[in-house]
Image (spheres, helix red, strand yellow):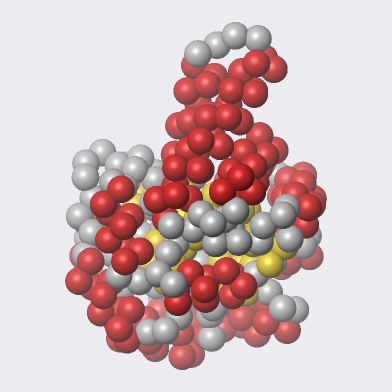
Amino acid sequence: MIVNLNDVLLDAQKNNYGVGLFNTTDTDMLEAVIAAAEELRSPVVIGTAEVLLPHGDLKLIAPSVVEAAKRASVPVVVHYDHGLTFERCMEAIKLGFSSIMFDGSAGGAEENIKNTAEMVKIAHALGITVEGEIGHVGQADSGDNEATDMYTTPEEAVDFVNRTGVDALAVAIGTAHGAYKSKPKLDIDRLKEIRTALDTPLVLHGGSGLSDDDFKDTIKHGIAKVNIFTDLCVAGAKAMEEGGEYLAIRDRKVQLIKETVMNKIRLFGSDGKY
């Protein structure tokens, strides 16, 4: 069944578990994620990100993602991740996505607030949830996730939520997108301070590659949604590297991605929640 972020994250926050967002650029990934969620009776978030569209056209993948969510026996949020432009976010809404992340974090703070608030106004009128982001979640290949002056502060978080009305907030506490070259240094104390100051569900981007203890710590101290993509790519690539007949490779790819998703669902504690 297709739902929005509020339908899954509010319970996750209340009962101290995390819900995974697994970006899906093709139907192999989509099949794997839905199968994992149904087998473990877990709510799940699926979708794609603007930066991934060269690898999976939005108009092509959206009908499959939306239909799979509707047919699923567990709650599925169809989420447009890291929407960088108003036009693309609106396209995702028109194509049936139930949730949008508007990412204006690369611009100035006031511009981010203004643009995010406008997206919230439109989306909420349609029953669609919005995730925003402040601070800077780095890129692992450049190591800029260690620039602590770009981390989210509690004061910024409260001001941003009050002025935009977002349903979820992605915070920068030391994670990065992509594969880590070295162990990330997470600022758990900062996360605790943000959670104490704010009731809005918090989101951890750059989850692939963190240790099990890292995930447990962040969820324990306030994270309700965890974004995963690179780990799915690694699992799929492993199947292809092993070689063989095309359809056999494809089936093995789906199975390995499914196993990866199931491991994350169990780790986040969302298994058996539906």
Q: Residue furthest top?
A: 244
Q: Quadrant of residue 31?
A: top right
Q: Residue furthest front?
A: 272
Is residue 243 in sight in this rendering?
yes
Who's the residue at 30% across and 70% down the image? 221
Left/right of residue 120 with respect to residue 190 in the rendered view: right
Quadrant of the drawing holding the N terminus: bottom right
Q: Position of residue 176 (x, y in %)?
A: 34, 52
Left/right of residue 260 with respect to residue 223 in the rendered view: right
- What is the total number of numbered labels drawn onto the structure image? 0
Is residue 33 in sight in this rendering?
no
Compared with residue 48, is residue 202 higher up or lower down, i.e. above or below?
A: below
Who's the residue at 40% across and 61% down the image? 204
Left/right of residue 150 with respect to residue 27 in the rendered view: left
Who's the residue at 60% across and 61% down the image? 274
Q: Position of residue 169 (x, y in %)?
A: 45, 73
Q: Position of residue 54 (x, y in %)?
A: 62, 41
Compared with residue 272, is residue 257 higher up or lower down, i.e. above or below?
A: above
Compared with residue 118, is residue 75 higher up or lower down, i.e. above or below?
A: above
Who's the residue at 42% across and 55% down the image? 268
In depth, the one of 133 and 208 nearer the eye is 208
Compared with residue 191, is residue 251 higher up or lower down, i.e. above or below?
A: above
Q: Position of residue 160 (x, y in %)?
A: 43, 84
Q: Quadrant of residue 102?
A: bottom right
Left/right of residue 244 with respect to residue 196 in the rendered view: right
In depth, the one of 201 and 50 nearer the eye is 201
